[in-house]
Amino acid sequence: MPELAMRGHMALRDYANHDGQQRAQDAGGGNGAAFVAKMAIGTLFVLAALAAIVWMIVLPLTEISRFEVSGAASLGSAELSAWSGLPAKSNWFTVDCDAVATSVAAHPAVASASAWRRFPNAVVVRVVERSPVAVVYAVGDSARVEAHCVDGEGVVFAPASAYAGASSLPVLSGLEIKGLRYGLRLGGPFPSLLASLAELRSSEPALVSAISELRVVSRNGAPVELLLYPARYRVPVRMRPVLNAGLLKSMMLVLDVVEGEGLSPIIRELDLRTDTFVYHTKEAVSG
């Protein structure tokens, strides 16, 4: 009997210990869950506070308020900003620089453009302006025939009156432009001719200044030709519609001889279409 009583007492004690441990574990689990919940709520409050700071302080500071332009000689930042496509109240974080560059490059007088952001509130655009190499005459906005600038890519991009040196540029003729709009790109033989003129203007500007007019001549069934009118000589020169420095230097030497020998009055044109220089005389006129 005493042994049975002892065993019963020990069983009761083990049960009490197990029950106490279970209650302690339950209490500990409850405290852990409460801690996690408090941490989550605290994190949410911190994030909300940060969002409020960004909304009230950072975003206003990063609203685009500066539009800077580099590389432009004749175009102002206000004009290019109007072409940029930037929405009102644009933000530094959301500006699409590729779209800005594409929009600015659509300006007729811009050959290329790139754009980037400058923290905290600026967009910077670098442009390469078109450079005139010749002028063409066409009816402009004034409904009058006026001179307009064309570049080495064959793009008509601005009135000649906007460029101080345009009056000394060669006149490009032999074409008719209807419905002129700036940004118009000339086709046919003109791009290659103007590209050669641009290269010549860069390497031998004195030769370009010796040219008064470049007339493209196109006849049915015949190759396109170029009739060059020198600035200081009376004899026009017929050649292929691409310019090069060596040919023009030879042309100037021949014209010097023609002028020096007093042959200009009887020569109709000088022909440089082949390797042999030929001159055509004027037909006799009776009466």
Image (spheres, grey):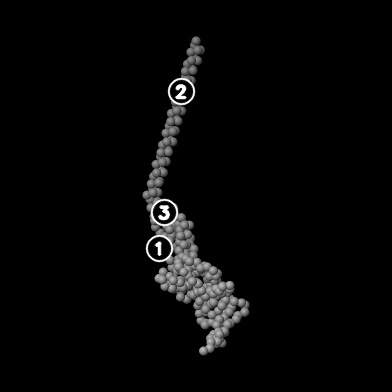
Which kind of residue does numbered mark 3 sit on? Asn
Q: Nearer the viewer, mark 2 or mark 3?
A: 3
Residue at position x 49%, y 18% from top? 11
The residue that label 3 is drawn on is 91
Foreground: 11 or 85? 85
Which residue is most to the top?
1
Residue at position x 39%, y 49% from top? 55
In the image, is residue 285 above or below residue 162? Answer: below
Foreground: 201 or 38? 201
Label 2 or label 3, whichever comes before in sequence order: 2
Q: SS class of the residue under badge 3?
A: loop
Which kind of residue does numbered mark 2 sit on? Asp
Label 2 or label 1, whichever comes before in sequence order: 2
The residue that label 2 is drawn on is 19
In the image, is residue 21 above or below residue 191? Answer: above
Q: Position of residue 153 (x, y in %)?
A: 52, 67
Residue 276 in which image quadrant: bottom right
Is any atom of residue 112 visible in this view?
A: yes
Q: CA distance from mark 2 to mark 1?
A: 82 Å
The residue that label 1 is drawn on is 78
Q: SS class of the residue under badge 1?
A: helix
Which residue is most to the right?
275
Label 1 or label 3, whichever comes before in sequence order: 1
